[in-house]
Image (cartoon, grey):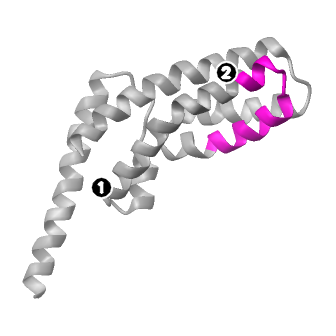
Amino acid sequence: MLMFFNISYFLVNLKVVVFSIFYQMATDQATHHVNLDFLKEISEGNTDLMRDLINLFITQVPTFSEQMELYLKNQDYCTLAKFAHKIKNSVAMMGIDELTSDMKKLENICTSKPDNNTVKTLVEKFKKISGEASVELQHILELL
């Protein structure tokens, strides 16, 4: 029984190591917005959990973009600030540090003195980078 456990443990760790190597190779060749170190840490290397969370993020991105566009169009800065706060956690989990920072900035701008041009720039940047990150994550899913 102990030998089976050791072999199983070895295989799980081997899968994580192989994933890390292929992930590094894939991201070296692609746009690099994603850093899955935090996701690996909180999932304790559980690739099924990582896969589920990545899939969830990928499916949420279009809705996030649509909602942000709607709040911007309606100049509903209060709701946009709350939404940016919510999104911040999702992008942070995927290690998209640039967007994490931008969502903090968007939240602060929308709660203080909103400037429509600045808000629009941040929303457009979110759409662009989150789209690129989704493609990157899709490639990573193929390696998991």
List x then y, in percent, for residue 73.
77, 17
Q: Nearer the viewer, residue 48 or 93?
A: 48
Q: Does 129 sit above or below residue 141?
A: above
Q: Does 109 sit above or below residue 87?
A: above
Circle 1 residues within 10 Å: few <14, some 14–19, many ≥20: some
Q: Does 4 sit above or below residue 97?
A: below
What residue lies at 37% left-to-right and 63% top-to-bottom?
Answer: 44
Instruction: Indicate left or right for 102 with 113 as reference.
Output: left
Most common SS among magenta residues: helix
Q: Residue furthest top?
A: 117
What residue lies at 23% left-to-right and 38% top-to-bottom?
Answer: 142
Q: Does 40 sit above or below residue 66?
A: below
Q: Residue furthest right?
A: 113
List x then y, in percent, for residue 79.
80, 36
| Residue at the disc numbered 2 | 123
Q: Nearer the viewer, residue 16 or 140?
A: 140
Q: Amino acid at mark 2?
A: Val
> In whole angstroms, how far apart are the C-alphas of marks 2 and 1?
31 Å
Instruction: Indicate left or right for 65 with 36 as reference.
Output: right
| Residue at the disc numbered 1 | 47
Mark 2 touching mark 1, by CB under 8 A? no
List x then y, in percent, for residue 104.
72, 36
Magenta residue span: 70-88
Question: How many numbered discs, if any?
Answer: 2
Instruction: Indicate left or right for 66 with 111 as reference.
Output: left
Regarding mark 2 in the picture, which secondary structure is present there? helix
Q: Is residue 131 magenta?
A: no
Q: Is residue 83 magenta?
A: yes
Quadrant containing the N terminus is bottom left
Regarding mark 1 in the picture, which secondary structure is present there? helix
Q: Quadrant of residue 121?
A: top right
Q: Amino acid at mark 1?
A: Thr
